[in-house]
Structure formats: structure tokens, C-alpha cells
Image (cartoon, coloured by chain):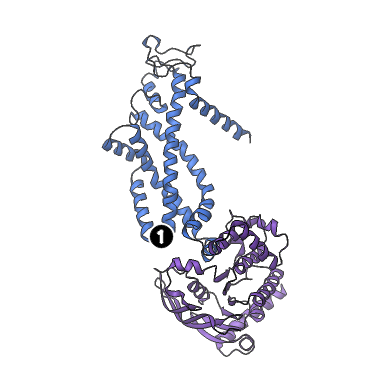
Amino acid sequence: MNREPVLSVEELAVYYTSSGLGIEDISFSIVRGEVLGLLGESGSGKSTVCNAILGLLDQSAVRIRGSIRLGDIEINSLSWHQREKINGKQIGIILQNPMSSFNPYMKIKGHFVETLCTHLSCSRRDAVRLGMEALKLTGLKDEKRIMNSYPFQLSGGMLQRIMIAIAVSLNPVLLIADEPTTALDDSNQKIILELLTKIMKEFCPAMLLVSHDIKVMEQLADRLIVLKDGQVRERGSTAGLLHNPADDYTRELLAAIRKLEVGRCWK
Amino acid sequence: MKKIIIGLLLIIIIMIAGAGAGMLSPNDPQKINLEDRYLNSSREYPLGTDAYGRCILSRLMYGTRYSIGLALVVMAGVVAITIPAGMAAAYRGKIVDKVFLWLCDISMALPPTVLVLAVMGLIGNGMVNLIFSTLFSYLGWYGRLVRSAAAAELAKEYITYAVTGGAGSFTILAKHVFPNIFSGLLVLFVLGIGDTILMLSSYSFLGIGLPAGVPEWGAMLNEQKACCFNHPGM
């Protein structure tokens, strides 16, 4: 397999001018077929890293240093117009809240058509056909009905699978999954996890996984980075880090999450 | 449901009366006949005649065209200007948004009535001037509404999702923001038509805007105010 990194982030620092917070000197790289997990509490800078990669940070409100390379391209210095071509096509995204991530006035079909036609210059019909294939892959039956449904007619778990289908239908080199299971119930979480595992096997993209769910990390992530207040506290292989944390903060965080999970079992 | 039907019937009747005034009205609304002043209702003049002996029913029917027609023109202008401008301001943000809000503030700084009076005083009387000055006085209010609705919509997660999917500015505004804000705004714009009718009528009532003698509801009310004690039937 090609070991060239798909995404390499070097000494990335983002500084919010209004609050003075941000992230400092974060470096990592992901190769094809690898899942890198970002673990950390709320406000630790996980989303900032994702937004920086996607170019979603408001340029007037932040100062960005460092480099973000996608393949050979330095995407940090691209104009927004050039970014538009990369977002969606090369970087697929899976967001946290499937219920609010779809335009309520647009059928599922429309979402597929919009994303696919922007990047592939294909006809509407081709886009729908491609979309149906992607839906089949995610294990959703009844693709025709789903295509003609509005987002509010479908469940959160289904919408999350649709979002994954849209993300993989363009065969991106990098998938960014921002807490893909947080908003879902247990059985749907399991389905999504299995689906993501399957996608890693079949499409072999690089994946940046953001989550604070240890179960998700254990199953998917190959390596982990623990963030706290915008700084890297610890990094290592998933198994090693979860069972044998070296940093005090990591230990504390893991203990807190485990305690929560035990509490949930008792409920 | 019943209320809707009754309201709809009234609107339809008024629309027909206005649109078909040429065929349906019993008399010429402009024809002055000083022998028939202040008549009560009769077969020839169903609602009687005014101080100049003109048929009131005919004038009411023709007046529909001016009152509602002008209001529709003004509101159509408001919609055509505020929706693209408001969405663009909310989307671009920064200096574009600031300039847009300043313009809105200028329009909102004076109450519509005062503003229109001032503008009409400056640029002169006339129907076109009336339309433009009324339009201008409304732009600020509706512009701000459109902008804030669009801004609220732009902050939602599905917009982020569309952006990460690579959607361009036009797609985002036309396909995502517009359909989601329009249903809410439509109600406001339709209610605005009623408001505009009242406002335009009040200018005619004050004797500005339309030339004298034009059968407009506000102007008719003004003319007949003079003799409401002698001839209350009118």
C-alpha cells in the first residue's frame, strides 16, 4: 500500500483573535487506510482542527500558522474558490447531527444531486443512480423511497447512513468524521460503526475521527491523539494509549469517560 | 375553514370589482354632473353620488385598481429588492453587511409617513414619485427582516454541511437559504400589502401623491369628509 501521507498537518496553530484561545503546534499525518482518532473534552480544539482542514474558519476572526497538506497540495493557502473543488470531492465529511444537517426543504435526492453534480459534471439522473448505489452499500433498503423523502421523514440513524453514502459516493481520499455516533442511540451507533469499518475496508480512505466515545475509538482508530486546551497531551497506538496511558490528563479523561459509561449501564 | 372561505370570497369579489371595473361599473367614475349632487342610492347610482355628482360605486370600483394596484407594485418592488440584497448581506457579512445595515438605518430613521412626506416635498408630486418614496421607506424594515432571517438560516448546520460538500455561494443562497426563509417572509409581505394600502390611502387623504380627481379610496374619503355632517349617507 502507498505509505505517502494523504493528510499531513505540520505545526498547525490557530488563534482566535477575540477570545485569545486556539490550538498550538499540532502535527500529525494520516496515510491511506488509516484512522486517526482525536480525543479530548469539549473545547479542547478538536473541531478547530477539523474546521481548519475544511477551511471553515472565518479568516478575519482567526490567525492560522503552519501547514496543512492534502497529498501534494498545500490547502492552507488556497483561496476559498479552490477549496470548494476539494471539499466534498477529496474530503468527505460526516457530521455529528444528522437530523439538522440536511436542508428540510430539499429531498434526499437533491442533496445527492447537488454534491455529485458540483464535482462530477454529471446529469441529474446519473447522480441519482450513483446515489442509489451508494445507499445500497450502506445497507439501506428501499433506496427509491428514501431518495424521494424529505429529511424529516427519515430517522436519525438513516440520515447518518445517507450522510455517509454522500461522503463516500465521490470516493474521497480523506474522510472527516466529526462525532459520527454521538447523536444516535446504541443500536444505530453499532450500525454506523460497522458501516464505517466496512467503508474503511472497501474504499480505503484516510480518516480523521473525532469522538469522545472510547468504544468508537477502540473499534475504528489505529492511532490516537489526546488534545487538551489546544495542545497535544499524548499520542500513540489506540490499544497502547487506552490501556496504558502515560499522561495524567489522559488517565483522568479515560477514567471520567469510563465512569460515565458504567453509569449509563445502570440506568 | 369557514373564515378562510369568507375572507377569500371577499378578496375575490374585490379583485373582480377592480379588474372588471370597466365593464361592471354602472357609470363613468370621472363624469361630473352637478345636477345630481349628493343623491341617495338609486337604480342609476347604487351607492348614490358625491359632491360633484359622480357615481360613488363606480369610483369605489375604479379606486380598487389604484389602492390595491399601487400597493402590489410597491410590495413587489420591496420583495424584488430586499430578498436578494438581504440574503447577500447576510451571506457576505463584514463590510457588505455593514453598508446594507446603514442603508436600512437611513430608511428606518424616519417613520414612513414623515419620510414619504419629505421626499414628496423634495422631488414633487406624482404617482411614480409616490411609488418610489413609499418603496424606499419600506426597504429598511423589510431589508432588515430578510437579512436577519437569512443570517439565522445561514448559521444552521445544514449550511455548513452544504459548504463542506462544495456548494457555491449561489447554490447556498438560492437552494438552501431562500426556500427556508421564504415561507416565513411571504406572510410578512402579504400582510405588508394591507399596510401599504392603508399608507397610500392616507397620503391621498392628505392630498399628496395622486393628482386630484383620481378615484382612490383615501382621496375619496378626504373629499367626503367635508360634508359628512350634511350628507352622512355618503
Q: Residue at x 47, y 59 (%)?
A: B169
In the displayed structure image, the side of residue B137 where residue B181 appears, left or right? right
Above or below residue A224? Residue B230 is: above
If the image is split into quadrants, where does the C terminus of chain B sit? top left
Report which residue position mark 1 lands on.
Answer: B93
* Residue extending furthest toward the left: B122
Please state the horizontal and vertical placement of residue B132, each as a whole percent of the image: 35, 39
Looking at the rendered structure, the kind of residue marked 1 is Gly
Q: Nearer the viewer, residue B175 or A128?
A: A128
Please state the horizontal and vertical placement of residue A86, each as a whole percent of the image: 51, 69
| Residue A157 showing in the rendered view | no
* Residue extending furthest toward the top: B35
Q: Nearer the viewer, residue B154 or A259?
A: B154
Colour in which chain B is drawn: blue
Please state the horizontal and vertical placement of residue B36, each as a whole percent of the image: 40, 10
Q: Residue at x 49, y 59 (%)?
A: B154
If the image is split into quadrants, where does the N terminus of chain B sit? top right
Crowding near pointer 1: few (<14 within 10 Å), some, many (20+)? some
Please state the horizontal and vertical placement of residue A98, each as a whole percent of the image: 61, 64
Mark 1 lies on a secondary structure that is loop
Q: Residue at x 45, y 50 (%)?
A: B146
| Residue B193 showing in the rendered view | yes
Above or below residue B85? Residue B159 is: below
Q: Residue at x 30, y 32 (%)?
A: B125
Q: Nearer the viewer, residue A132 or B20?
A: A132
Q: What is the chain letter for disc 1?
A: B
What number of labels is visible? 1
Colour in which chain A is drawn: purple
